Image (cartoon, rainbow, N blue to C red):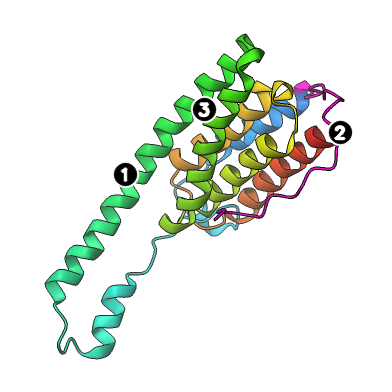
Amino acid sequence: MRCGPAVRASTRSPATKPSLNLSLLELEFFRFFRDVWGSMSDNSHNNGAYQLITPPNLLKAKVGGLGGGGIDVDAIRQASSAIEIMAGDFEERVALDVTMIMKLSHDLDADPSRAAKIGDKLSRIGLEMSCQGETFGFELISGVGASMCRYIQELGDPESLKGDVIRAHADAMRAIIKNKVKGDGGVVGTELVTSLEKLVDRMIAE
């Protein structure tokens, strides 16, 4: 079972090795998204640029709706607390995974002959993020993880993987987790994921 958006079958011949054409302007564009949430004030979440969302406690709502009759309220509270702890753990795991992604991207640049193995590792990390991000309220992490997976899986020739493209995804993940941007991220979040998807489309098509 595949998590995240369905991966489209690639029709490009693997014989043509795509070249990286990331301009300096384009690289600065992704750095902007990495830093943009951090530059916003605490009150800027009302301007539509992004959303800091506290997920509703659905278990608590259900207990209240049923009047608490026949339900172990303490057990439900413990379960709710466990979910919140797991969400915090997820943020820590993403931060560690981002560090690993950056390392692997540099390993890729240093030794393209290892691209297949490195791509497999990156794909597993991206798949885990795309599956778990939305579960803990980080929809953008799911979108970025799915985009990275699609880039690796659809490119065809592993040795055509480019470290800069991988790092663009890692920078996006770092910004999302650092600023605890949950939900869809508003306008900035939508533009971020769309830009990554367009980058991936271009790299696959070359």
Image coords of residue 72 (percent x, y): 13, 78
**Badge 3 local density, few (<14 within 10 Å), some, or many (20+)?**
many
Q: What's the mark number on residue 27? A: none
Residue 133 sits above or below residue 73 on the image: above
Residue at figure coordinates x 48%, y 56% from the top left: 134
Q: For the residue labelled by badge 3, is the local secondary structure a helix, a strand or a loop?
A: helix
Figure label count? 3
Residue at figure coordinates x 82%, y 21% from the top left: 19
Q: What's the mark number on residue 101? A: 3
Nearest to the observer: residue 150 or residue 184: 150
Q: Is residue 39 visible?
A: no
Left or right, residue 161 beside residue 57: right
User: Marks 1/3: CA distance?
Assistant: 18 Å
Image coords of residue 59 (percent x, y): 29, 74
**Badge 1 local density, few (<14 within 10 Å), some, or many (20+)?**
few
Q: For the residue labelled by badge 2, is the local secondary structure a helix, a strand or a loop?
A: loop
Q: Earlier in the sequence, mark 1 or mark 2?
A: 2
Q: For the residue labelled by badge 1, is the local secondary structure a helix, a strand or a loop?
A: helix
Mark 3, mark 2: which one is toward the viewer? 2
Q: Which residue, given by chain and number where applicable, does mark 2 sit on?
A: 13
User: Marks 1/2: CA distance?
Assistant: 41 Å
Position of the N terminus, as image quadrant, is bottom right
Image coords of residue 9 (percent x, y): 76, 47
What amino acid is labelled 1 in the image? Asp
Left or right, residue 135 beside residue 64: right
Position of the C terminus, as image quadrant, is top right
Magenta stretch: includes residue 32: no
Residue at figure coordinates x 79%, y 32% from the top left: 203
Q: Earlier in the sequence, mark 3 or mark 2?
A: 2
What amino acid is labelled 2 in the image? Ser
**Mark 1 vs 2: CB contact within 8 A:** no
The range drawn in magenta is 1-24
